[in-house]
Image (tube, rainbow, N blue to C red):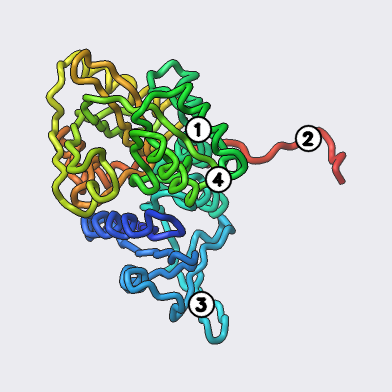
Amino acid sequence: MAKKIRVGVIFGGRSGEHEVSIVSAQSVMAALSKKKYEVIPIGITKQGKWIAGSQAVKFLKDGMKKLPFKSHLTADPTERRLIKTSDDSSKLIRSSADKLDVIFPVLHGPYGEDGTIQGMLELAGIPYVGAGVLGSAVAMDKIIQKQITDQAGLPSTKYDWFLTQDWKEDRQLIIRRLEQNLKYPMFTKPANLGSSVGIGKCHNRKELIAGITAATRYDRRVIVEEGIENIHEIEVAVLGNDKPKASVPGEIIASNEFYDYDAKYIDGKSQAVIPAKLPAAVIKKIQTIAVAAFKALDLAGMARADFLVTKNRHQIYLNEVNTIPGFTAISMYPKLWQVSGLKYSELLDRLIQLALERHSQKTRLATSFKPKNDWYK
């Protein structure tokens, strides 16, 4: 019998998307084949404490601050394991059963999707699903992401950005600048967050002030984008490493004025039309832009590219790219691939395979250099 692959699924985290992450991870763990994989749930509390094991989901859902034991991922690449410590004795508990073959991070937002956990996994020498340190970091930051995709010549809406500290010091100056450069409605967003947390649609100055104030709760930088009216909200899933492919596009018909947190996860009234009812030429162009953005941001494994497409002339605007898209039962990323011919369980298999392939490529690279003489000694 072939040895099962030990997959650590990390979820929760110190982020405004903590709850979404838990639900996504439950869907992933339920769909992973029990014949192929041994799944190790790894939860991270809102305080940043790690706990691994079958009760990890329960501990996080209960919001426990004091855990029966803590799990720690060692940065030693020769270990590739979780080490447990008892709160009572701080005794190290090591076991060969704690070894990990690959990590599937289902962490949305800061400390999970922004390159931080990816850097830790690089140090630990453990293969992991999704983009690397660089791709994760630049894609998570909406400002840097737009600067890179603008440089690549990809179409996007007009935007401006500023520091939270600048807003506190002279909000009138920033408001005048925004109203001079952008038209209402405007969307206010924290630079580093997802799941529409902290996002506001602003039709006038009063709403703009409220939206910016809300966004500053989550980040030290805020981005403000010019809204496009009368649009299709289109999403495309991208899968692969160096040769990524795009799924069929899907359209989101939001239950609220825009696809906010409630419309995504709570009220259950938003609809997804897959495939989107767009002309074939428009679909092909959207898919081409999605793959181009994936490559420009140096992504790997998976990403979901979100677009705004005008209903009258089918003008295409790349809204943003997400490196760890939602994996709940109602999430678009797995749905898009399912309609494209790849079942949920097969998609997970492919993502794990891509993670192992990418890690194998990296391990073949030189990590040391032998000088002509031992000058450094």
For this rendering, which residue is in front, 154 or 51? 154
Residues tagged 2 and 3 counted as in contact (Cβ below 8 A): no
Horizontal side, residue 80 vs residue 319: left or right: right
Q: Which residue is mark 4?
A: 220
Q: Which residue is mark 3?
A: 93
Across and down, in percent, residue 193 comes to 43, 45
Residues tagged 2 and 1 counted as in contact (Cβ below 8 A): no
Say the numbered circle drawn on residue 329.
Answer: none
Position above or below: 177 against 252: above
Task: Calculate the distance from the C-alpha at mark 3 to the C-alpha at mark 4.
Answer: 39 Å
Residue shown at the point (52%, 37%) measured from the top left: 134
Q: Comparing marks 4 and 1, which lies closer to the viewer?
A: 1
Q: Which residue is mark 1?
A: 175
Position above or below: 114 against 336: below
Q: Comparing marks 3 and 4, which lies closer to the viewer?
A: 4
Q: Which residue is mark 2?
A: 371
Residue shown at the point (15%, 21%) measured from the top left: 278
Which numbered disc flags the more N-terminal residue, 1 or 3? Answer: 3
Q: Comparing marks 2 and 3, which lies closer to the viewer?
A: 3
Residues tagged 3 and 4 counted as in contact (Cβ below 8 A): no
Element marked by disc 4? loop
